[in-house]
Image (tube, rainbow, N blue to C red):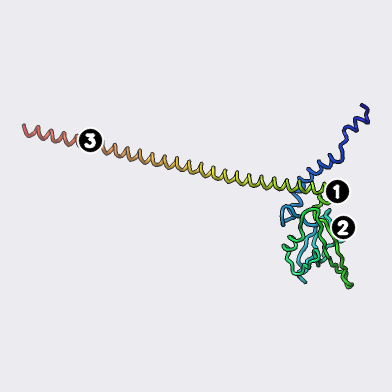
């Protein structure tokens, strides 16, 4: 085998590399982006965080997650106002309502109508379609395509379900351990109670035996005196 053939035999196909990357990123996903989503284990956003403006109650962008679709678009800026979401007005919406509506399955799209104040000029209005997904999902989608990105998402969901199952098992084990500790404590209490009762019984038994012995002694002394008196009567 030539040196070239030897090197070629060690090369891995793009599919093999992608599969390893999928598994590695699935592990990262579970502990990172999932923490930003509160609408459900299978839903994510577009990488935007909003606040309600105290001045007019509008929904304003306060931060953009690096690597997200919003960040990669290069259009959205901090303090931009969200006017409509999928052609529905968001006026008067709470942050919870916005989050549950904005979040969705990774790989799906959502349309945002944004307005930007440009200082004394007419506000700049624009509409942008953004893909839902974590930065790793977007990165993987760009590199390997939507199909593999969907596979990544499936692995992420699988990891989350495994974590949930392990958490349930851990909780059950803690409950069983607590029950075991309680049973052991009750057993120790029962043994101690039995010991105390036995000690009390032994004390009562000793008192009884002592009382019996004293009575026997008194009876013996009494009988002795009676016997002596009878002897005296015949003197």
User: What residue is shown with label 2?
Assistant: 73
Secondary structure at badge 3 equals helix
Secondary structure at badge 2 equals helix
Give left or right: position of 234 versus 166.
left
Secondary structure at badge 1 equals loop
Q: Which mark is residue 145?
A: 1
Mark 3 or mark 2: name the one nearer the start of the chain: 2
Q: Residues within 10 Å of mark 1 (few under 14, many from 20)?
A: few
Alpha-carbon span between mark 1 and mark 3: 105 Å
Alpha-carbon span between mark 3 and mark 2: 108 Å
Q: Is residue 10 above or below residue 152?
A: above
Mark 1 or mark 2: name the one nearer the start of the chain: 2
Residue found at x 86% / y 46%: 144
Q: Is residue 55 visible?
A: no
**Residue 197 found in image quarter:** top left
**Residue reaching furthest to the front:** 147
Q: Is residue 31 visible?
A: yes
Where in the figure is residue 199, as x and y percent of width and height?
A: 38, 39
User: What residue is shown with label 3?
Assistant: 216
Mark 1 or mark 3: name the one nearer the start of the chain: 1
């Amino acid at each position: 085998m030539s040196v070239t053939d030897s090197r070629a035999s060690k090369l891995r196909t793009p599919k093999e590399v992608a599969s390893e990357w999928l598994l590695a990123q699935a592990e990262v996903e579970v502990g990172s982006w999932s923490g930003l989503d509160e609408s459900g284990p299978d839903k994510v956003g577009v990488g935007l965080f909003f606040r309600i403006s105290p001045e007019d109650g509008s929904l304003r962008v306060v931060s953009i997650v690096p690597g997200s679709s919003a960040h990669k678009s290069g259009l959205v800026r901090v303090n931009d106002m969200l006017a409509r979401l999928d052609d529905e007005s968001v006026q008067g919406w709470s942050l919870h309502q916005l989050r549950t509506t904005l979040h969705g399955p990774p790989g799906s799209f959502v349309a945002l109508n944004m307005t930007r104040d440009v200082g004394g000029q007419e506000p700049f209005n624009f509409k942008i379609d953004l893909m839902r997904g974590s930065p790793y999902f977007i990165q993987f989608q760009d590199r390997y395509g939507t199909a593999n990105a969907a596979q990544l998402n499936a692995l992420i969901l699988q990891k989350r379900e495994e974590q949930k199952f392990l958490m349930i098992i851990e909780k059950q084990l803690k409950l069983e351990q607590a029950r075991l500790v309680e049973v052991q404590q009750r057993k120790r209490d029962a043994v101690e109670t039995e010991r105390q009762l036995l000690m009390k019984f032994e004390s009562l038994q000793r008192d009884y035996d002592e009382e019996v012995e004293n009575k026997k002694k008194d009876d013996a002394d009494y009988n002795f005196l009676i016997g002596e008196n009878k002897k005296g009567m015949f003197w």
